[in-house]
Image (cartoon, rainbow, N blue to C red):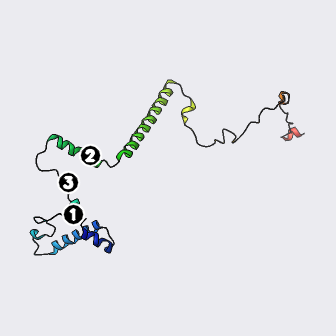
Amino acid sequence: MPTQWRTIAPIVGQTPSQCLERYEKLLDAACVEDKNYEPGDDPRKLRLGEINPNPESKPARPDPVDMDEDEKEMLSEARARLANTSGKKGKRKAREKQLKEARRLASLQKQRELKAAGIDNGQWKGKRKGIDYNAEIPFMKKPPLGFFDVTDEDRPVEQPKFPTTIEELE
């Protein structure tokens, strides 16, 4: 950015590039309104020996001279590198994501093949996070075995049957 826009920008409260864009818009509007406008008098045109104040705004163009094949290849590689903004980390993440998807598809295919062969076990249903309160008693600990033999005590306790109907009561 030229220093004039760097100087003006903090006063206006914008970035230098925003100031320059606004200036370009104002120049375009002034050129449209001016009846005596000639394209040769455009203040944005560079005269011989002047330096472009905003070279970043111009698109990159290769030299008009015919280049060798290796130079063209180098340019195309550079364009590809510049277009690839993801970088090393992005490439690694994309590769890991692709591997994860491939693993998932392979396990799905294996599951389908086992099911087609008649080997269908419940291990493929997936793990559930947390406790299944319908299938188990949560946080249940079995008491440790004691020092004494209690096999005689493990007999079923008979519950007395109470009459439930009127006929049984009579």
- Report how far apart the C-alphas of labels 1 and 2 lie in the structure: 25 Å
Specify the amino acid type for callout 3. Ala
- Report how far apart the C-alphas of labels 3 and 1 lie in the structure: 13 Å
- What residue sits right under mark 2 in the picture? 80
- What residue sits right under mark 1 in the picture? 54
Of callouts 1 and 2, which one flags the residue occurring earlier in the amino acid sequence?
1
Specify the amino acid type for callout 2. Ala
Secondary structure state at the residue bearing disc 2: helix
Residue drawn at x 49%, y 30% is 111
Up the image or down, 5 lies above or below 62; here it is below
- Residue 146 placed where, x, y %? 81, 32
Left or right: residue 93 versus residue 69 is right
Q: Which of marks 1 and 2 is in front?
A: 1
- Residue 158 placed where, x, y %? 85, 33
Specify the amino acid type for callout 1. Asn
Q: Residue 60 carries which label?
A: 3
Residue drawn at x 10%, y 68% is 39
User: Where, by quadrant of the figure, is residue 166 drawn?
Assistant: top right
Residue drawn at x 61%, y 43% is 130
Up the image or down, 24 lies above or below 152; here it is below
